[in-house]
Image (tube, rainbow, N blue to C red):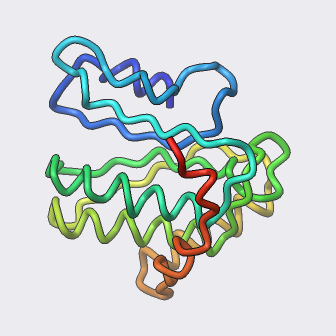
């Protein structure tokens, strides 16, 4: 995400949003990194501590990303979908399950439907647990195909509030 952030951090026509473990390689993504010049305020980093899972991620998407996107009104939502937040990933340190990936996809689909005619593109990024990535991608595809509907509110309610404090 740091390359994407740096590519658009001076461009107010692109809203960049990222959730990620921080501090972690390459050491970028602090919440104070909010864009530069005319793009100031259009970069939104939500760094999370190690151990966050489905509840915390869904809560961030529902309570931060969705309202910001609805106000910004993008023409398209483009997602770099990383699966290194899977619970068994050897590098990520997070606890997201395949059900959590489906719920995050549901949040994105609802947001895209509300603000940009459903235009949503997901591109596959990293992940270092082969079965976790396989299972996560499978649930994302099932969600996009309308074959499952995760309970995002239930997952969001499970969030540990300590992880969501600023």
Tell me: 86 left or right of 17: right
Tell me: 119 left or right of 145: left
> At x 34% / y 36%, what residue is drawn?
16
Q: From this viewpoint, which residue is outermost toward the top?
A: 37
**Image coords of residue 77 (percent x, y):** 29, 51
Tell me: 101 left or right of 59: right
- Residue 11 sits in which quadrant? top left
- Judging depth in this view, the residue of 5 and 28 nearest the camera is 28
Tell me: 95 left or right of 115: right
- Judging depth in this view, the residue of 159 and 38 nearest the camera is 159
Please give the count of numbered marks on the rendered protein: 0
> At x 47% / y 44%, what residue is drawn?
80
**Image coords of residue 91 (percent x, y):** 80, 40
> At x 18% / y 48%, what residue is drawn?
74
> At x 80% / y 50%, what residue is drawn?
89
Q: Would you place residue 78 above or below residue 88 in this image? A: above
- Residue 53 sits in which quadrant? bottom right
**Image coords of residue 35 (percent x, y):** 31, 21
Q: Would you place residue 159 above or below residue 25 in this image? A: below
- Judging depth in this view, the residue of 159 and 80 nearest the camera is 159
**Image coords of residue 49 (percent x, y):** 67, 42
- Residue 43 sits in which quadrant? top left
């Amino acid at each position: 995400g740091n390359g994407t952030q740096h590519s658009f951090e001076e461009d107010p026509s692109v809203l960049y949003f990222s959730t990620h473990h921080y501090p972690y390689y390459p050491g970028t993504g602090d919440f104070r990194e909010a864009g530069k010049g005319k793009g100031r305020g259009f970069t939104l980093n939500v760094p999370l501590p190690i151990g966050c899972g489905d509840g915390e991620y869904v809560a961030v998407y529902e309570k931060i990303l969705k309202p910001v996107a609805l106000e910004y009104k993008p023409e398209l939502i483009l997602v770099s979908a990383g699966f290194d937040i899977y619970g068994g990933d050897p590098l990520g340190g997070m606890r997201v399950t395949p059900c959590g990936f489906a719920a995050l996809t549901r949040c994105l689909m609802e947001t895209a439907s509300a603000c940009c005619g459903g235009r949503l593109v997901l591109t596959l990024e990293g992940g270092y647990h082969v079965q976790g990535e396989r299972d996560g991608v499978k649930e994302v595809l099932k969600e996009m195909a309308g074959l499952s509907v995760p309970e995002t509110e239930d997952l969001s309610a499970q969030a540990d509030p300590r992880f969501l404090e600023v």
